[in-house]
Amino acid sequence: MENYNGGCSCSQQQSTYEDQHVHELLGSTQLAGAYGCRAAHNHRFATVTDRAIPCGESHIHEVEFRTDTCDDHNHEFCGKTGPAVWLCDGRHVHYLEDCTNTADGHKHEFRAATLIESPTCCE
C-alpha cells in the first residue's frame, strides 16, 4: 500500500506559516475481519484536517480520526495527506491512502480524498 505523505514529517512545520485552511475528509474503510464466525465488515469516518504544513513546493495536512463502531470495536488513524492536487479553478484537494490501527485482531485499509477547501468562499 502506498502512503501519500510524500516523505514530509511534522518537524518541517514552520511556526510562521500563515496558511490556516483545513479540509473536510470522509469515507469508508475497505472490508476486513472475515475470520471465524465473524463476517467481513467496514467502518466509516468523518473529520477535518489540521492546518496546512509546508512540504517542498506544496503542503500537506495532519489527519486524525476514530471510525464508527461495528462488531463492538472501532479503529483510529493518525497520519498525513499527500501534497495538494490543484484543480482547474485554483482550489485543491489532497489524497490519503493508508490503514487504520489494529483493533479486535485486524486493521482496515482506506483511500480517500479531502473535499475542496472553503467550498463557498471566493478568494
Image (spheres, grey):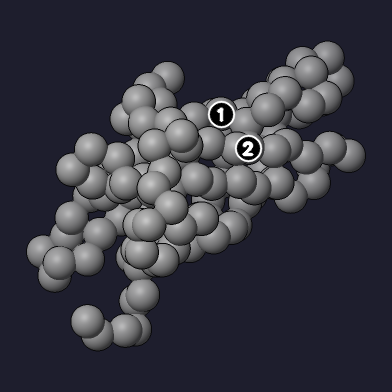
Secondary structure of the residue carrying numbered label 2: strand
CB of mark 1 within 8 Å of CB of mark 2?
A: yes
Disc number for residue 78: none
Report the amino acid beneath label 1.
Cys
* Residue for point 41% across, 66% down: 20
Does residue 40 appear left or right of residue 63 in this picture? Answer: right
Quadrant where the image shows the N terminus: top left
> Could you tell me residue 2's position as x and y percent?
38, 22
Q: CA distance from mark 1 to mark 2?
A: 7 Å
Q: Residue furthest left?
A: 88
Q: Quadrant of residue 116?
A: bottom left
Above/below status of 95 relative to 86:
above
Residue under label 1, please give it. 99
Q: Nearer the viewer, residue 55 or 17?
A: 17
Q: Residue furthest front?
A: 16
Q: Is residue 95 visible?
A: no
Q: Mark 2: give few (<14), some (14-19) or many (20+) Cα within 10 Å.
A: some
Q: Is residue 29 visible?
A: yes
* Residue for point 53% across, 46% down: 63
Report the amino acid beneath label 2.
Phe
> Could you tell me residue 57's position as x and y percent?
18, 43
> Could you tell me residue 96's position as x and y percent?
41, 40
1 or 2: tag closer to the N-terminus: 2
Does residue 9 appear left or right of residue 35 in this picture? Answer: left
* Residue for point 37% across, 31% down: 8
Residue under label 2, please give it. 77
* Residue for point 25% across, 59% down: 92
Q: Quadrant of residue 38?
A: top right
Quadrant where the image shows the C terminus: bottom left
Q: Nearer the viewer, residue 23 or 34?
A: 23
Q: Nearer the viewer, residue 30 or 102?
A: 102
Secondary structure of the residue carrying numbered label 1: strand
